Amino acid sequence: MATRPTAASVEKRRAILDAAIRVFAERGFNHCRVSDIADEAGVAYGLVYHYFKSKDAVLDEVFLERWGLMLEVIEEAKADDALTAREKLAKVATFIVESYGHRPDVMQVVIVEVTRQANTFGRRHWAKIQEGHAGIAQIVEDAQARGELRSDIPASFAGIVFYGGIEQILTAWIFDLMPAGPEDRRLAVETLVETICGGLDARP
Amino acid sequence: MATRPTAASVEKRRAILDAAIRVFAERGFNHCRVSDIADEAGVAYGLVYHYFKSKDAVLDEVFLERWGLMLEVIEEAKADDALTAREKLAKVATFIVESYGHRPDVMQVVIVEVTRQANTFGRRHWAKIQEGHAGIAQIVEDAQARGELRSDIPASFAGIVFYGGIEQILTAWIFDLMPAGPEDRRLAVETLVETICGGLDARP
Amino acid sequence: MATRPTAASVEKRRAILDAAIRVFAERGFNHCRVSDIADEAGVAYGLVYHYFKSKDAVLDEVFLERWGLMLEVIEEAKADDALTAREKLAKVATFIVESYGHRPDVMQVVIVEVTRQANTFGRRHWAKIQEGHAGIAQIVEDAQARGELRSDIPASFAGIVFYGGIEQILTAWIFDLMPAGPEDRRLAVETLVETICGGLDARP
Amino acid sequence: MATRPTAASVEKRRAILDAAIRVFAERGFNHCRVSDIADEAGVAYGLVYHYFKSKDAVLDEVFLERWGLMLEVIEEAKADDALTAREKLAKVATFIVESYGHRPDVMQVVIVEVTRQANTFGRRHWAKIQEGHAGIAQIVEDAQARGELRSDIPASFAGIVFYGGIEQILTAWIFDLMPAGPEDRRLAVETLVETICGGLDARP
DNA sequence: AATGAATGAGAGTTCATTCAT
DNA sequence: AATGAATGAACTCTCATTCAT
């Protein structure tokens, strides 16, 4: 008797998801109740459970939706032969950074509530998170194969450091330790790529 | 009636702290009960509250103790005029990495349960955590002033990226995504410093 | 999403309140657990917290409901110009005493757990309790103005003594130190009013 | 091996008792810990248990000591043939009221923490408390027998009302609802006796 | 007599999830 | 699809009392 979801029900579901993002971002996953999500969405308590299996499942979906987009961008960048390694890395970083620009709440939830939660959601989504690291590593490895990047630094290691850098930058933005305006974001990408690829050493 | 703590009581307190580290590392702060700490330490439930104000206070102390040591090392490295910037950064990274080597449980608790918990303990200890970023940034800034590192990359930004890289490496170790043996650790420091200072770009 | 309470939910709430009265009267507020209330009401533990903010809030409501009725009676008595001072005081005393006749458990809770608990609930409800004293005092004061009662005894003082007498009588009943049958209650009112108004002195 | 208590130990015991009175009066019996008593007395935690069987026992002793004095005074008043009923009642009331004048903390503890605690200490000491009511009732009864007070009001009832009046007055003082200076106290006794014996009715 | 470390039972409250309507 | 009443397990913290020294 499975019926196709109506347009209205799809909207309700979306409304709950969006409400959850706002509430998770504002109070944190562990410090809000399911009823807070329902209140924010303007629906009844029980309806959250009609559309989602559990509170966890709501966060899972917020994460997977956004992280999936990022993985697609990484894949695209990797496959685009017209780009240099620097351009590929910049493309990835730009996507993440501009995701924060457009929806800081979504990215805060993804970073703070999932990827940095090593004991709970981070662990559950390890595979997906690693796909990100691996994609970046792959970009590096391809460039190493082409002689564009040096080969004495393991690509997987570079992927981890590059991602670690971005995550820390976002964390600093989320907690207002650095300005995150449009120009700041553009500069952050440029500087990160320059740091990792060019290195901090003074030019001779 | 404040009396000097006896040697025995100091030991009991320490035993509880060590038990807490083991339990926090194994199950995570949020997934263990105070009674688990007491059981692990082989003491009565209430004794935990005799020595610590709350469960939170136990974790606070674990964090502050270790983080304080790291801040001292950063300070030392910064002040040591005999070292190059690379050597200073390596000294800091080595301390963190070797802390993990000696007491992986402690570092797991510090990283996973505190510094990455942006909504709870991470927020509470922001000031201390930032001291770490700032110390590294200071090392970079001093080197920029001496012309040892390039000045077009903001030191504070470099500090964040460098720390983000280390934290991500430790996270990967903690979750067994990379080997963390003695040689791996030595290499990690060397590679991290080479990545950040030398850059990934192929040598001409 | 505030909706009108259904008839069923109002009944459940009432059932919990009535169960609380029985349990508080039998074991005392401090010697019963919230689960005792739930068990007595035949509902789940958590439902008590669905309807009431806390265990304290349950007692608050028991008290305020009954005390409010008493304040209304005092107000009525005060305003009724057809009554003499003695009749007014008798009306107030009768209401309290008959409240005990009908619902000894409620009055026991009000007196023993609230008005006599000077350090906890009594303090919290001081304002309301004093309204009672003040209302009685007002009755006395009006009668003094009319020359019906002597004016050399401060009305507020008389109010306190009269209320103190009633409270002590109820306490004696609650602890079975005096019989509290219908005739005893009628006599108690009559005798109290006669004592306070007529005085113990032998008639010349 | 029971040895006679030394003068020093008697003093320590007294110091603990006095500290307990201050702490009980300030915070209430249920809101202070045994360690608060020890701290206030400037002795070690465990010493309280050396001198007293339990926390309850400390309060028991505070109560019994003071209540015993009152019972003696009632006995004296009752037996003094030179006094009229009014003088006897005034003597009793004066003792209680002046006890409050000299040691408001002691009387607060006796009234608030014991006699008004119908479910705990009040119940435990019912017999002693009733001795007080009965003593007053006896004074009334003797006066009735001599024709000094009217006989149509049961003496036991009069005793309860008289005591209820005093208790309520003290409660009002304790919670600062009425002034309790020396002159206020003298007047309170006079007015109470005049109310109960003379009655509130206007003199013809 | 004196100390304070050690014990452990106890209770209020929260909140994810289920379910009847 | 929608509601919100109902459930009950989970867990921290308190503090009177005991005991070794």
Image: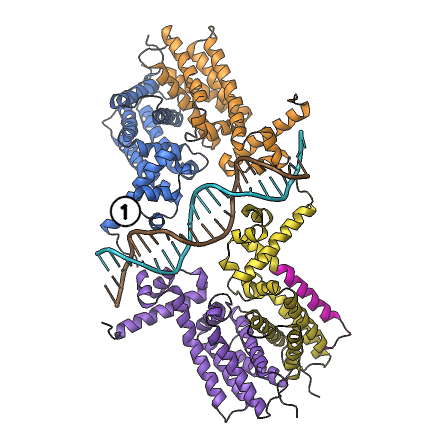
Chain colours: A purple, B yellow, C blue, D orange, E cyan, F brown
Q: Secondary structure at mark 1?
A: helix
Amino acid on which disc 1 is placed: Lys
Identify the residue at image location x=48%, y=84%: A74
**With F20 as the anchor, is E9 left or right in this view?**
left
Relative to A56, does residue C160 appear above or below in the rendering? above
Relative to D136, does residue C6 appear above or below in the rendering? below
Identify the residue at image location x=55%, y=24%: D102
Identify the residue at image location x=48%, y=90%: A79
Tell me residue B33's x, y (percent): 50, 54
B82 part of magenta stretch: yes
Write the start and end of the magenta stretch as one range.
Answer: B63-85
Q: Is residue A88 visible?
A: yes
Q: In the image shown, does A24 or D49 lie closer to the viewer?
A: D49
The secondary structure that most of the magenta stretch takes on is: helix
Relative to E16, does residue B141 appear above or below in the rendering? below
Tell me residue B165's x, y (percent): 59, 75
Label 1 sits on residue: C12
Identify the residue at image location x=34%, y=70%: A15
Tell me residue D96's x, y (percent): 49, 21
Tell me residue B139's x, y (percent): 69, 73
